[in-house]
């Protein structure tokens, strides 16, 4: 007897966002506000 396997998949389009602020917290809040509905933010980084 054959075994049937099912899965749910989704696309993995990525985009980069940038924001600036007077502090890390302010810059992060500004960046968070740019994330479209339904998207998942995968990480933060800063450039020094």
Image (cartoon, grey):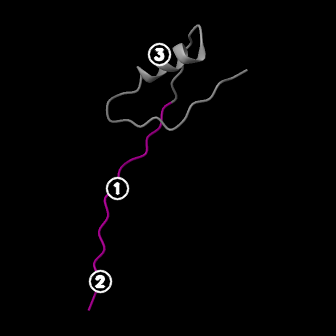
Of tags 3 and 2, which is closer to the observer? 3
- Residue 13, position as x, y percentages in the image: 43, 41
- Residue 21, position as x, y percentages in the image: 56, 10
Horizontal placement of 37 versus 23: left or right?
A: left
Comes first in the chain, label 3 or label 2: 2
Q: How many numbered marks have been drawn onto this rendered protein structure?
A: 3
> Does the stretch in magenta take in 45?
no
What is the residue that sits farthest to the top in this orientation? Answer: 22
The label shown at residue 9 is 1
Q: CA distance from mark 1 to mark 3?
A: 30 Å
- Residues drawn in magenta: 1-15
Q: CA distance from mark 1 to mark 2?
A: 19 Å
Residue at 29 percent of width and 83 percent of height? 3
Q: Secondary structure at mark 2?
A: loop
Residue at 32 percent of width and 30 percent of height? 37
Using the rendered view, name the quadrant where residue 9 is placed: bottom left
Q: Secondary structure at mark 1?
A: loop
Of tags 1 and 3, which is closer to the observer? 3
Q: CA distance from mark 3 to mark 2?
A: 49 Å
Depth order, front residue of 47/28: 28
The label shown at residue 30 is 3
Q: Are marks 3 and 2 in contact (CB under 8 Å)?
A: no
Report which residue position mark 2 lands on.
3
Q: Residues within 10 Å of mark 2 (few under 14, many from 20)?
A: few
Comes first in the chain, label 1 or label 2: 2
Q: The N terminus is located in which quarter? A: bottom left
- Residue 27, position as x, y percentages in the image: 54, 15
Residue at 35 percent of width and 50 percent of height? 10
């Amino acid at each position: 007897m054959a075994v049937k396997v099912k899965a749910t998949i989704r696309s993995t389009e990525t985009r980069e966002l940038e924001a600036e602020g007077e502090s890390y917290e302010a810059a992060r809040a500004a960046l968070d506000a740019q994330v479209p509905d339904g998207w998942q933010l995968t990480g933060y980084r800063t450039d020094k």
